[in-house]
Amino acid sequence: MRWKRKFICFLCKSLMERQTKDTGLHYDRYLREVIEYLEKDPHFREKLKNADMDDIKQGKLSKELNFVQHNFRSKLDELKREEINRLRMLIKAKHDTEEHNAMDHQTLLKQFEHLNHMNPHTFEVDDLDRLIQSATKDLENFDKERHDEFKKYEMLKEHERRERLKGMSEEDRKKAEQHYEEMKKKHANHPKVNHPGSEDQLKEVWQETDGLDPQDFDPKTFFKMHDSNGDGFFDESELEALFTKELEKVYNPDNEEDDMVEMEEERLRMKEHVMNETLDQNPIYTEEELRDYEQHLANEESDISKKSVELQKQREELERQQEELNNQKLGLKQVKKLKTFESTWLKVKDPLRSSFDLL
């Protein structure tokens, strides 16, 4: 099982769920296609199975590209040329959109970090090494952003709960606090949760999901049974399927005290633990972080309030100007009517004056 976890550390982290999830990287398609063709080469696939993280970080695995079959190398060359052309078109479109504005060259160069753009024709060892390093770094940042979003979700939920309490009477506040504590205790009261990826967890799946005798547990047989696509690796979806039973011990969508958003965060943390062989037991957020977040919300609310007041003033000013304009239009209409009346009167008056003169 250990080499499979190393493989996931190398290429997974949201990466190996082929045809199910987008990694969120701007070079996602290129990354997937390169992996697909490398996996088809028997030599590279075998080296990948036996590689450790040091080999990967030091670029030793990338050097095995030199022994990949010619037909796969040719396809990798083609994929790189397509990626270079895509990036060039993207940059041209960006340049045309920004017209004469200065382009950020640092941002521009980052678009090419996952390959060697100085050689636009062939896929070499350096290209594979850059792709591995870029994908690892970018996906770690992507996971961090997801964790940060969850932290904001939890802090906003707690902030809203405390705000509701402020608007309650003393009696209702005590009842709400009591109910909150009861829900926390109820949520914590669940069967033992096994350590993610541990033998106990796998044996429980073997016994309760697969219906087999725990005394007959065999890791190789277990792996074959749960490698659902038969590719010889545990990808993310297959790992997450193993965690479902553990999560069901703690979360039930029908229970008031169980938050399904928290369940998905826990699923992500379990997956990362198995891939990284670490598990962070720190709280989601601290009281200080919550206070900072509440201050951030208060500042946003203050800004919105100021903008609302300013917009109201602008609206009143526009209404005043519109009223002045309407009055001016009305005045012009009255002047026009008066001039029309005077003109008509003069036309009638002149013939009458001529008649009197004749008399």
Image (cartoon, grey):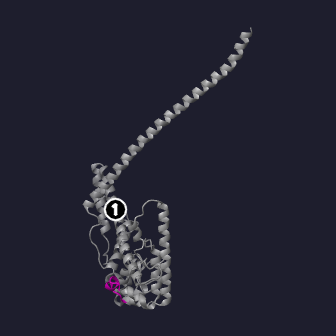
Identify the residue at image location x=54%, y=28%: 331
Figure quadrant of residue 271: bottom left
Compared to 11, does 221 lie above or below?
below
Q: Is residue 349 visible?
A: yes
Q: Which quarter of the rendered picture does the N terminus lie within?
A: bottom left
Residue 58 drawn in magenta: yes
Q: Is residue 252 left or right of residue 349?
A: left
Give percent across and percent down for residue 83: 48, 76
Q: Check the image and name the residue furthest to the left.
A: 288
Q: How many marks?
A: 1
Q: Name the quadrant containing residue 7.
A: bottom left
SS type, badge 1: helix
The answer, for residue 267, to whether it is visible in the render is: no
Name the residue that disc number 1 marks: 152
Q: Looking at the picture, tell me which residue is in the foreground, 76 or 31.
A: 76
- The majority secondary structure of the magenta stretch comes to helix
Query: Dot 1: within a 10 Å radius of its alpha carbon, few (fewer than 14), some, or many (20 or more) residues?
Result: some
Q: Please indicate whether residue 160 sits to the left or right of residue 92 in the image.
A: left
Q: Which residues are magenta?
A: 50-59
What amino acid type is highlighted by mark number 1? Lys
- Horizontal and vertical percent position of residue 11: 39, 80
Query: On screen, 43 above or below 297?
Result: below
